[in-house]
Image (tube, helix red, strand yellow):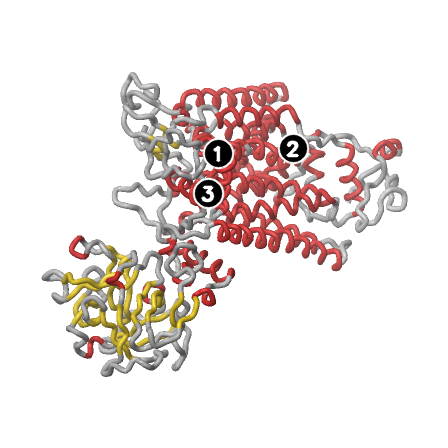
Amino acid sequence: MEDSCGEGSCTQSQSCTTVRSRKPCMDTEKYREKGCSKKPETRRAARVSSTDTQGFNGTSSEKRLCKRENQLRSDSDHTPLCPLLSVAALSLCTRFYRITEPPHVCWDETHFGKMGSYYINRTFFFDVHPPLGKMLIGLAGYLTGYDGTFPFIKPGDKYEHHNYWGMRGFCAVLGSCLPPFAFLVVLELSHSTPAALITASLLIFDTGFITLSQYILLDPILMFFIMGAVLSMVRFNRQRLRPFSWSWWLWLLLTGVNLSGSLGVKFVGLFIILLVGINTAWDLWRLLGDLHLSLVDFMKHLIARIFSLIMLPLFLYTTIFAVHFVILNRSGPGDGFFSSAFQSRLIGNNLHSASMPEYLAYGSIITLKNLRIAGGYLHSHWHLYPEGVGAHQQQVTAYLHKDNNNLWLVKRPNSDDFTELIRHGDIIRLEHKETTRNLHSHLHEAPLTKKHLQVTGYGINGTGDPNDLWQVEVCGGKKGDPVKVLRSKVRFLHRSTGCVLYSSGKTLPKWGWEQVEVTCSPYLKETPNSQWNIEDHINPKLPNISLHVLKPSFLEILLESHIVMIRGNSGLKPKDNEVNSKPWHWPINYQGLRFSGVNETEYRVYLLGNPVIWWLNLFSLGLFVVMVSLCSVALQRGAKLEGTRKAHCQVLMEGGGLLFLGWLLHYLPFYTMGRILYYHHYFPAMLFSSMLTGISLDTFLQNADLLFSPAISKRILRGGQIVLLVGILYSFYLFHPLSYGMSGPLAHDPTSSMAGLRWLDSWEF
C-alpha cells in the first residue's frame, strides 16, 4: 500500500501510535514540516477519503490510518453555518405561513386532535398506532392552553374559541426540522454543499411536505424521528476513528433514542430500525476483519451497540407505554377493544373495583365477551331470523355494548344441581336469561358466512334438544382445569355438529339490528373469533373476590395492547366508495388527498406533492442506478479512478447506496400489505428519494467534464444548479395554493387560480 508521507518520513516509531490507541499521527504543522503532505486533491476528495465506510474502528493499515487522521485534523470540516441557517429559516417560514388556516378540522385532525384531547382528559381510547405521537400532540395542546374540550367530531367543524394553534404549531416545528436534517445528512455523506442545498430545496418547496407539516397529524412527528435517526447514524459513522469518545457515544445513543421515537409513533418505524440494523451489522463485520483489533476490543464495540441500539430503544419504547397506561386511567371509548381483565384497571368501568366469584360454576349468570377486536358480547333478543334465513328461530348475535340481553345462565345438561365448578371438558347448556331459550346450533347455514352453521335461541323455559349442548374448552388447559373469570380464554364446541361458537365480525342487515353475526364454525383452529372470556359473573353460592387481584400485570397489558394494535392495523379495509391508493401511484404523484373542502364555495386544501420535484426525484432514481452501474463496471474492469472521480464514485456507491436502501426499505414493504393504503404513506420514502436526488444530480453535474472541456463543464455545472433552483421556485409559486388554501372556481374553470395546472386527470383539485 502506498505510504501516506514522503518515503520513510512517517514511520510508526516517529508519529503513529498503535492502532488500538487511535491517537493522531502528529501535530499537523510538524507533519507538513517533515514533508508528509502529499499533493493536495480537492476538498471533497479528501473529505470522502476520511469518511470511507469501513469499520467504525478504522482500517486495518496503520499507515493509512495515519494519513486519514491527519487529513481529518488538517481539513476544515465545519458545517457551513450560513447555508444551514438559511435552510432552517426558509423551512420555518414555509411551514408557519397561514398555520391557523383553515380554522376548522381538516382530514385526520378529527382523529389525532381528538386523541390529544383524550390525553388531556385522561380518557382511555384505542388506536392502531403506538402512543408517542398522540401523547406529544396532547402535551403540546396542554402547554399552549388547550383544555381538551373540543369534540373533533368530523372534518369541517369550526374550532371557534378553542386554542388549536399550539398542536398545529408543534407539528409544524417538527416538520420544519426535516430540511435542515436532510441538509446535514447529505453534507455528511457527500461533503458537497451544493448537493445538500439541492436536497434542502426539494423538501422546503414541496407542497406535500408543507401540507403534512401544518396540521395535527402523526406524519411530521414520525419523519422527525426517522431523519433524526439517519442523521445520528451518519454522524456516528464519522466517529469511527475516535471510538468510545464522548462524541462517539453521543451519536450512538442519539441513534437509539430516535429509533425508539420512530417506533413509538408508528409501526413503520420498523423500517428505519432495519436500515440502522443493516448499517450496524455491516460495520461490525468490517471491524471483525480488522486484524489489528483484538477480540476483546471487538466485544466492547458489540456490547456498546447492543446496549445503545437494542436495549436502550426497547427500554424507552416500553417506558412510552408505561406513561401511556398511567395517564389514560379512566374508562373511555377504547374499553371494548380490550379484554375484560384489561378493562378492570380503568376507573369508571363497571369491572373496576368490582367483586365476583373467581371460578365459573353451574348456576352462574354470566356475560361472554368475544376476544376479537370489537367482537362484542354474546347476545340474544326476542326477534327471530326472517323467513329464508336459516331456521325461523330466535336470533343470536354479538352486541358491542353492555345490555341485559347479554346475560346467560349456565346449566347442566340434565340437572339443576348448581354446586360444582365447571372445568375443561365439561358439557353445559347456556340459557338466555331474558327469553329462557337455549344457545342452539344445527345444520342450517349461517346468514352471512355461508360455510358456517346458524346459531339460534331454541326451546322454552330451559327445555330443548341435544343441539343445545356445548363442551367447554379452556385454551391451553387440560381436563379438570377450572374456568377463571376474566383470565381464561374459553371455546364452546357444539356436541352434535363438532363446530365451534364463532363471532364472524360481519354486520347483519337491519333485520338483525346491524349487530355482529354469530355462527358455529366447522374450522376448529384457535382464533380470537372463536375465543371468549367470562366478564360478568353472578353466583350467590360462591364467595366473591375483588377483581383487583385479577388485574393483569404491566407486561400482560403491554402484550395485549400490541396484539390489539396489530390486529386493528391489519383489519383496516376501505370503506364504501373510499379510494384505496396503490403503492405504484405514489412515486409518479398520481393522486393526492383532499384535506379540506370539495366545492368552489369551500376553503380547499389538497395534499399533493410538487409535481416538478416528485418527477425530478423519479428521474434521479433512474439516473442514480445508471451512474452506479457505470462506476461498478469501471471498477470491475480495473479502470484507474483518481482524485475527484474516485471520490464521486465513493459518494455514489456508499452514501447514495445507503439512501437508496433507505428508500427501498420505506417503500417496497407496502406492496405486501393487505390493509388500506393512503398517499401520505410514501412521504418517509420520499425523504430518502430527495436526499438521493441531491447527491445524484450534484455528482452528475460535477462530472460534466467527462464529455466537455473544463470551461464548458464549469458553465454546465453553474447553469444546471441555477436551472434547478429556478425550476423548484417557479413550480412552488404555481402550486403553493394546494398547501396554503384555494377558494373560488375549481381548476377546470379558466378563471380559477389553478387553471391549467391540473396536469393529470386523477388530481382532484
Q: Compared with residue 662, is residue 45 higher up or lower down, i.e. above or below?
A: above
Q: Which residue is mark 2?
A: 191
Q: Which residue is mark 1?
A: 145
Alpha carbon distance from label 3 to label 2: 45 Å
Q: Compared with residue 260, is residue 30 higher up or lower down, i.e. above or below?
A: above
Q: Nearer the viewer, mark 2 or mark 1?
A: 1
Residue 120's disc number: 3
| Disc 2 residue type (three-letter) | His
Q: Compared with residue 741, is residue 405 higher up or lower down, i.e. above or below?
A: below
In the rendered image, the quadrant that contains the N terminus is top right
* Sequence order check, earlier mark of 3 and 2: 3
Q: Is residue 331 left or right of residue 394?
A: right
Taking depth in this image into account, of 79 and 387 the one nearest to the observer is 387
Element under disc 3: helix
Judge whether residue 348 can be spotted in this image: yes
Crowd rating for badge 3 (residues with CA inside 10 Å; few <14, some 14–19, many 20+) = many
Alpha carbon distance from label 2 to label 1: 44 Å
**x then y, percent, for residue 283:** 65, 50
| Image point (39%, 43%), residue name | 583
| Disc 3 residue type (three-letter) | Ile
Q: Nearer the viewer, mark 3 or mark 2?
A: 3
* Sequence order check, earlier mark of 3 and 1: 3
| Disc 1 residue type (three-letter) | Gly
